[in-house]
Structure formats: structure tokens, C-alpha cells
Image: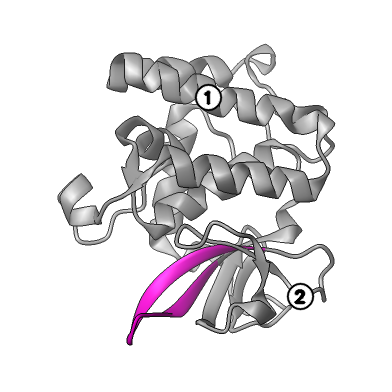
Amino acid sequence: MALAGLLALGGAPGAIAWDAALMERTMVQRYGAYGQQQYSAWRALVDSGAQLDEREKLRRVNEHWNRAVRFGEDMEVWGQEDYWATPVETLGRGRGDCEDYVIGKYFSLRVMGVPEEKLRLTYVRARVGGATQAHMVLSYYATPEAMPLVLDSLVSSIMPASSRTDLTPVFSFNAEGIFTGSGSTATHPVDRLTRWRDVLIRMRAEGAIP
């Protein structure tokens, strides 16, 4: 892939490189005018990254994905029991489940220059009503030992994990590895997660270079 075709948006150190032209072309080819509209709105979001501090990036990304995507179960949207969609797929369909929101937010923040080590995709047990269900949120750590902030598709406000007593962390991961519970040290390599590995392969084919 030619270097000239790769962009690191937001003007921030640490932003991941990606092929904007390929990503836009993929969105339009698959999803037509709706795909173009979704891509343009998302591109405007990430282009704003250079002017924003990290807390404002979190707020805008969380708000954008919670507004742009409607919840839909994998079986209903993809005809599969458990499918992790790429950001292109989620925006193109305009629907997704908790993992899809988290992947989209994670990718957006990385493109906007938020460092890898500050972000974790976190599996939790969530109390919803009287029941407990498996759920995924995005956790942001300002420092390695800080109380993380939680970006959630079910709750519009970004809150510290200590205020989310409805959530019990099970494990989390990023490119550095897998973390058990709320631990700060990776205990296993991330390539054990086959669904994550698969979604990264598809993201690369669509122009994302995570």
C-alpha cells in the first residue's frame, strides 16, 4: 500500500494510520448514499481531533456512536449468533450490539490519537432490571493506575467505573494483551481472542490499519 494513501487523522502523536480513500469507497460501494452520509459524519468527527483534549474526544465519540447506531442483536442484523462487526459494517448498517459500539469507539479514538494503552475493550456482567447479562463497554485510563472512565452504549453519560455499580468487570483487552478483572497487567496475549483477530483482518481489508 502506498504511503501517500495512508492518513493519521487528528494531527495527534500516536494516531493510527488508515486508508481514508479505501474506507470511503468501501462504504459507498456497499451501502450507497446512506454509507456516504455515515462516513462523512464520522470523518468530520475524527477530523476534529486535533483541536480537542482527550476528555472531549471521549465525549464526542461516545455521543456520535450512540446516536449513529441503533441497537440490534447479531442474529437479527447479521444472521449469526455472535458476530463482531467492523466500524464500516456497523455504520453502513446503522445497527449493532454492544461489541460493535465498543469497536467503533475504540477505533475512532485511536484514529484521533488516544494512545493504545489508555483504552481497553472490557467484558462485564451488567445488571439490567432484575437480570444480569453479558455486556461490553470501552474503558479509558488517564494513567495506568487511574480509575477508568466507562463509555457505554446503554448509558449516555461517561462515568468513572466506581459509579457504575451495575457493572462487574470480567476481563478486558487491547493490543497489549488480555487483562483479568480490573487488573493493570496483561496476563495473556491478545491473539487468543479469535473474534478480535478476525475483525482486525476485515478492518485492514476495508482501509483501517489498526
The residue shown at (20%, 61%) is: 81
Predominant SS along the magenta part? strand
The residue shown at (36%, 52%) is: 84
Q: Secondary structure at mark 1?
A: helix
Residue range (magenta): 122-139
Amino acid on which the number 1 mark rests in the picture = Ala
Q: Which residue is mark 2?
A: 147
Residue 22 visible within the image: yes
- On the rendered image, what quadrant is the N terminus found in? top right
Q: Earlier in the sequence, mark 1 or mark 2?
A: 1
The image position of residue 150, as x and y in percent, is 62, 65
Q: Which residue is mark 1?
A: 41
* Mark 1: few/some/many CA within 10 Å (<14, 14-19, 20+): few
Q: Secondary structure at mark 2?
A: loop
- Establish if 69 lies above or below 51: below
Tell me how far mark 1 sits from mark 2, CA to CA: 31 Å
